[in-house]
Structures are given as C-alpha cells and as structure tokens.
Image: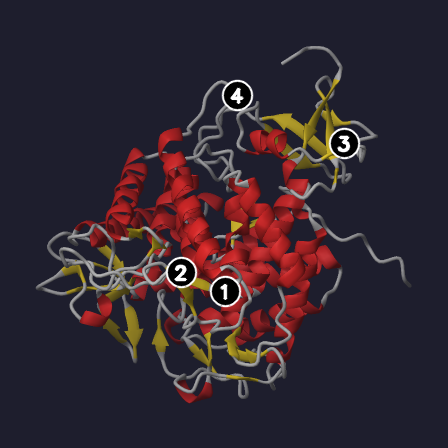
Amino acid sequence: MSSTSTHLVWSAVTIVALTGITLTTLKYNETSNDISDDYLDNDEDFNFNQTQEYFNYHNPKFHYEIKQNGSLMITERRVVKRSSDDDVIQYSIDDKNSSMIDEAKRQKVKEMMQHAWSNYKTYAWGKNELKPISKRAHTGSIFGSYDIGATIVDSMDTLYIMGMKDEFDEGREWIAKKFTLDNVSADISVFETNIRFVGGFLAAYALTGDPIFKEKAQYVADKLLPAFQTPTGIPYALINFRTGSSKNYGWASGGSSILSEFGTLHLEFVYLSDITGNPVYRERVMNIRSILKDLEKPRGLYPNYLNPKTGKWGQQHMSLGALGDSFFEYLLKAWLQSGQTDEEARDMYDEAMVAIIEHMVRKSSPSGLTYVSDMKFDRLEHKMDHLACFAGGLFGLGSRTLQNQHADKYMEVAEGITNTCHESYIRTYTHLGPESFRFSDAVEAKALKSQEKYYILRPETFESYFIMWRLTHDQKYRDWGWDAIQALEKHCRSDGGYSGIKNVYLDPPQQDDVQQSFFLAESLKYLYLLFSDDSLLPLDEWVFNTEAHPLPIRNANPLYRLAAPSSSP
C-alpha cells in the first residue's frame, strides 16, 4: 500500500445495487485509518466488475468497524490466530498476501449454480421450482402452482456473491415487475415464506442496498402479520395471502403451532424493524420470546408443540431435527445478530443446549458416533434427522462466540455431530446422506425404513462443513465437501438441472425430478463458501438465517443500515 495521504476510493459493494443506480462509496484515508468527512460520494456510476472483484477479495482486505461516536472506521485486516481468550469467531482472516481460496473447486460450484439456474430459467421461469427430468415447472411445491418465483428470490444472494451479474439482473427485473402475493389464495407456510422470501429479500438488500429488496421484504412480512392474531400472539402455521385467514396444520398435536416455525422468525423480523423503523415486527417476535422464556420446560427441554390459544405445551416431543431445529439456531443467532448484546437469547440458548446434551446427545456402539436423539414422552428415539446435521455448525458457533464453561463441550459435540453426518453419507452407495438415520445394536448412521432413504438436495451437512472449516481450518471439512460435490454431480445432475434421489443406497439411484429452491439458496452457497477465502462473508460480520441468507451483524457490520431516528414527537 502507498504511504501517501491520498484518499483511496473503495466501492462498497455491499452498499449498492447491481442495477445501475447511483453508487455510494467510502473514501479511505490511509494515514488516519479513518473515513473522511466527505465519505458520501454519489457521482460515480455503479461498476459491477470492479465491485465484484472487491467483494471476492482479490484486492487487499479491510475490516469495517463502527466507532462509539457512530463514525465508520476501516482498518486493514490482519492475520488472526485464535487463542483461548480471543473474541474472533473465525480461525483466521488472511492478510493481503495470502488466500485460502481453492479456486478450481469454487469455480466448479459456480458452474453447478449456472447449470441449475439456466435450466430453471428455461423451463420454469417465474414458477416456484423446477422438475429437471420432465423439464417443466414443479407445481406440487410447498408454494403450489402460484407464480411467486421461489427459486428466483431464494437464489438472489447466491447469484450475487458468485458474481453472476446477468442472472442477478434477470432476477431483480422479475422481482420488480412481477412479484406479488396478492392473488395467492391457498394455505401457505408462514415459516417457509419468512425464511425464503423475507430472508431472501433482506439478504439481497443487505448485500446491495437496493431499496426494492427492502420494500419487498416489508411487503411480504406485512402479509404474514395476520397469522399473529391469536389469543397469545403465537402465530398460526398457515396463511391465505388473499384473505388473511390463518390456521394450524390439522396433524399438529392439539391444534398446536410448531416450535421450529414460530420460533424461526426472529432474525428477519428484528432486522426488518431496524431498517424500516417500524417496531411492529420486533414486537411480534419479542412477544414469542417472552412466552417461551416464562414457560416451564420439562427437563429444561422445549417441546415441539405449543397451543396458540392457551399458551400451553402440546405433545411432549422434543427434537433438534424436524419440528424443533431452527428455534435453537435462532436463539444463538439472535445474540450474534445483536452484536452479542441480547443476553436473554444467549442465556436461553445455553440453557437449552446444556439440557439437550444431557438428555438427548448420545454415542453409538461400537464406533462411538455422536448423535442427537428425539425424545418422546421421556423416551429416546435413537434416530437422527438430516435436518439435525446443522447442529454441528451450531454447537461450533456456540463454542467460538463465547468462551464460557460450556465452550469445550460444545466444540466436542460440534466435531462429533459433523463427523456422524459425514459417516451417514459415506456409508451409502451414493455418498449422499439419507433423510434420517438410526442407531441400534445392529446399525449405526443408517436408514432402515424406505421413507428415510431419500435425499432431496438438503444443505445441513454442507452447512456444518462450512462453519467447522471457518472455525478450525481442518482440511477434512473441505475434503468431505468435495466428495459431496462429486456425488451430486454423479447422481443428481441431469441435462435439465439437479434432482434429489429416492434411495441413497441403490446402484444406480432413481432421481425424484425436483430441483428444490434451497439447493440454490443453501447447498450451493455453503459449498461455494467452503472453498472461498475466509473474508468472503466472515462469520464475525454476518449471520446466516436458516435458509442460508446472510444478514449483517449489528455494530460489527456497517451494512446493517439502521433506519434514521424518527423526527416526530
């Protein structure tokens, strides 16, 4: 770097849109390590190639920090090696002369994204998902036959971080001109709409600063608000966007709402309140928090079912997989998102994890594989869902982000669960993991029932590989990820995109003819990040929602963009 006092102008890629709107730049003063007073400059047009080069960290890397007086300071990144008392989450942030990029593998993942996207565009544009074998739209998705572009919205941030400008522009144009929920007259999942649409729009806004994405996020969230009109404020699971009527699933215990669904709104709603200045979204999720905090927990555990009319638990079924999973994820991540100031969330997380480790985490025999059982009526079911494979990364983040008395145990469990999920993959013919797998005297990490043997392009294991790589730099996590990529290419790819498979143990497996939107939103994003440099979406500055949409961390990332305080009395 030059030693002169000349201002260097860095295009702040995550502050601008990719659509030719005016660019807001940050002027960095090398001598003072501070932002000049005239740091706002609206005279330059947006340059995608320039900013994408910066965003992919081919240029020297900088760290952003908001000082106590509210001003923005940029300092050069340094090599960081964790010590026991270091508060940096990631293992290292490399200096400008080194890189942890595995470019060949990263480019392979990008090519996979291009293949998935181009076929969706050709055969199902504007629809929700693609049937890659049939080469037509998948109308049986959770969003039905309504043309609300689930794959488009879910993919926007992945396209952006991969530098796929043309594809991003296509998606933005469709969103600006075509996206609407006004005509959707069907029972749609509040949870899925939040994590894919609200989360997807918020991430796109955080990355670009394009106001269209903030507007769409608020529009969708407003459509969800009628679901909260219950005696307790615990939302129903399903809503009709045209009428505003809402209800719960008929199969749920005693008309209950589902923990993993109503408990997985916090990140999106809090961030939306902060960037719009409208407190209603935060108020809705903080009410949920308050109810859950005050309820008695059997053995310190949270049951999966809660009645929204009475505020009482339903069936005593506890899980870190389906029906429970992302609630626990959002406790930790709410604390992270707040800049580690939401102590209530962190305390609730630690209390829950200690109880789960004591009552639900077990080791198999003879291999000693760590797994998380479900508990039903005080009895363990020695089965683990693929959905629970995210817990490796979750426990790892819990260990790295607060060096308390639980940290070492959290990391031990994190490494164990991630290894077990890897074992569930390599113990199949396809090297892809089953939907759930069991442990007994006869089997370890293997599915036994036909309805457990499918793989639908799920991301949870890749998520843990990515997080554990960022925390430890243990090469095995990249090796495991590359093995999975090869398996996806061999067994899931077709001319028309990517399909799940019906039985991971068969040679050859039969494809299910569905390209899930989360394959583009999550699976490919986590694999791309696994082979990218640590400074691409660093965990010290970003937190991922449960659909892998990155949201900025308050007070650690200036891209949080708090709304200006209201001037009204």
Mark sitting earlier along the chain (1/3): 3
The quadrant in which residue 502 appears is: bottom left
Q: Between tags 4 and 2, which lies in front?
A: 2
Q: Which residue is mark 1?
A: 127
Mark sitting earlier along the chain (4/3): 3
> Label 1 to label 3, Cα distance in Å?
36 Å
Confirm whether residue 357 shows in the render.
no
Callout 2: helix, strand or loop?
loop
Callout 1: helix, strand or loop?
loop
Which of the labelled discs sits on residue 516, or is there none? 2
Instruction: Identify whether 56 is placed above or below 333.
Output: above
- Dots 4, 2 in contact, CB < 8 A: no
Q: Residues within 10 Å of mark 1 (few under 14, many from 20)?
A: many
Instruction: Identify whether 468 is placed above or below 292.
Output: above
Residue 120 vs residue 90, the one in the foreground: 120
Image quarter (top left, top right, bottom left or bottom right) of the N terminus: top right
Visual colour scheme: secondary structure
> Label 2 to label 3, Cα distance in Å?
39 Å
Which of the labelled discs sits on residue 44, or is there none? 3
Residue 394 percent coordinates (x, y):
41, 53
